[in-house]
Image (spheres, helix red, strand yellow):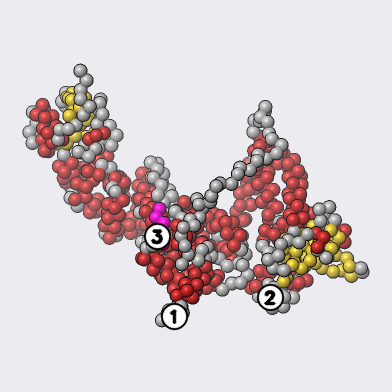
Amino acid sequence: MAPPRNVVKIAIKMRDAIPQLIQLDQAKPLAAVLKEVCDAWSLTHSERYALQFADGHRRYITENNRAEIKNGSILCLSTAPDLEAEQLLGGLQSNSPEGRREALRRLVPLASDMIFAREVISRNGLQILGTIIEDGDEMNQQLQTKAMALLTALLQGASPVERKHMLDYLWQRNLRQFIYKNIIHSAAPMGDEMAHHLYVLQALMLGLLEPRMRTPLDPYSQEQREQLQVLRQAAFEVEGESSGAGLSADRRRSLCAREFRKLGFSNSNPAQDLERVPPGLLALDNMLYFSRNAPSAYSRFVLENSSREDKHECPFARGSIQLTVLLCELLRVGEPCSETAQDFSPMFFGQDQSFHELFCVGIQLLNKTWKEMRATQEDFDKVMQVVREQLARTLALKPTSLELFRTKVNALTYGEVLRLRQTERLHQEGTLAPPILELREKLKPELMGLIRQQRLLRLCEGTLFRKISSRRRQDKLWFCCLSPNHKLLQYGDMEEGASPPTLESLPEQLPVADMRALLTGKDCPHVREKGSGKQNKDLYELAFSISYDRGEEEAYLNFIAPSKREFYLWTDGLSALLGSPMGSEQTRLDLEQLLTMETKLRLLELENVPIPERPPPVPPPPTNFNFCYDCSIAEP
């Protein structure tokens, strides 16, 4: 006859005793079950005992988790967690190093059980552990390492709320500073085990940020709306003044919306930017921390970029949101701890608010790199890739302090990043097998022809250019394109907002056969005499001219490209028409990408695998786009 569903057959072990085979009635109180087990072994005071799972982490069995006991489970009868914790903590405070070592050896595997961990913490266990770690020296490094193992095990077993309280308590006792000064900077070499515990401690510390990272901004939260206003006011309001004082409500809302856009939010309602998770509210926390703890740097960043009129402004809010995501990825915020990793950053133990301080360095680095790259809004992703590389390379050096990190990352300029990339690429090519290098060389002419074809097609599509008057006003536009037979450049003035003209409507023509040379930058006649002002330097980056024959005279067709990418595409295309090499940075990147892809394809085993001549059809668009924009949230 089968036992009832709430009865399971199990075995219970005890040291130096024959195991008991019993039928456990899950409806019976656990205390009654313990009494029966103790009576079978003639043990008194059953309240001093507890049951544990025999495998895994030897977790204590409670009324909450007893449902995990299945048919065939093996349990152990052991000392109750309160008595065990009291006994082992007493061993930690003994004068014998061997006794403390043995107590730690027994404590570590039990610490991941929160039932036991709470007993340890309630008996002042954290303070005892902190004392052992702080009293460590070269003579008892092993003891110090075991204490760190116990500490990290206790923290890993705790709930997020309990973990925060525990870390707050430990940091109040300056344990972070002690670790930084006496373990990280110790003269004795750090073992792999201690490095792993420091990695776990850092991961748990950064893991406290995860709830903020996963929580989007609530547009109906009064507190969060006020925080956004504080951020805006810190950037645009003079002390003692109130933005929009004396204005109507509609006018005041319009003014605030405009200032939020100047602050770098993509929407006039910033709540829409901060709905993305990650980074959620963590991005807002970072921006507020920067504005409060580095007010002069914050004001300088925002005002410098919000007052620019050359499309080169670096968006503070958008950059802050993406930088927060980037830092979470680099530091693996919210990811589970690896069982073997040792990748901790010493500087995180050097001061409080380490993540926010790192953000402050990163956001200023973003502004610096943006200016070095002469970036525009369409270069945003490219700039963020460079910033990611700057941060990742510097973190890999394991700087011991935030100041050292700031020095090293600021020395890693955009030019230095390009140099390192080139060096690594050459090294990689040098390590390639000769047949692969030979294949790459054979592929280059074909791929350069493909790039040339793309550039000429782009010129045939045409581009809208702007004219710079003596007052540098962007008030005149003109359109230029290459004829389909590649024999004529056709161009003419255009009104702003008008549709692209047809070839027949363009009044001016320049035969390609009359073109002499391509000039760029300061060599162009239309920017040569502009001087060395900041705005003129930006023009130099986008200026190019075509010299051509007009009768017996030499004339010029002058261009100001709307972006750096258009500059590269047009100078490459014009160079191709003139029979000159296409030497732009964009061509080098395109060629490297095509070479890498084509080499991999050639090395694949594709026998009997049909390769289509045409690309597959583009799938139909989705029925709605609600997944990328919530139309239900109205702007203020």
The residue labelled by disc 3 is 218
Spatial separation of the CA atoms under disc 3 and disc 2: 43 Å
SS class, disc 3: loop
Which mark sits nearer the N-terminus, 1 or 3?
3
Which mark sits nearer the N-terminus, 3 or 2?
3
Magenta span dominant secondary structure: loop
**13 to the left or right of 529:** left
Picture quarter with the N terminus:
top left
Which mark sits nearer the N-terminus, 1 or 2?
1
The residue positioned farthest toward the right in the image shown? 552
Name the amino acid, label 3: Asp
The magenta region covers 214-219
SS class, disc 2: loop
Residue 472, numbered circle: 2
Spatial separation of the CA atoms under disc 1 and disc 2: 34 Å
Dot 3: within a 10 Å radius of its alpha carbon, few (fewer than 14), some, or many (20 or more) residues?
A: some
Residue 425, position as x, y percentages in the image:
63, 48
Please determine whether, in this image, residue 416 is positioned above or below residue 604: below
Please determine whether, in this image, residue 117 is positioned above or below residue 570: above
Kindly identify the residue that appears in the image at 59 percent across and 72 percent down. Answer: 308
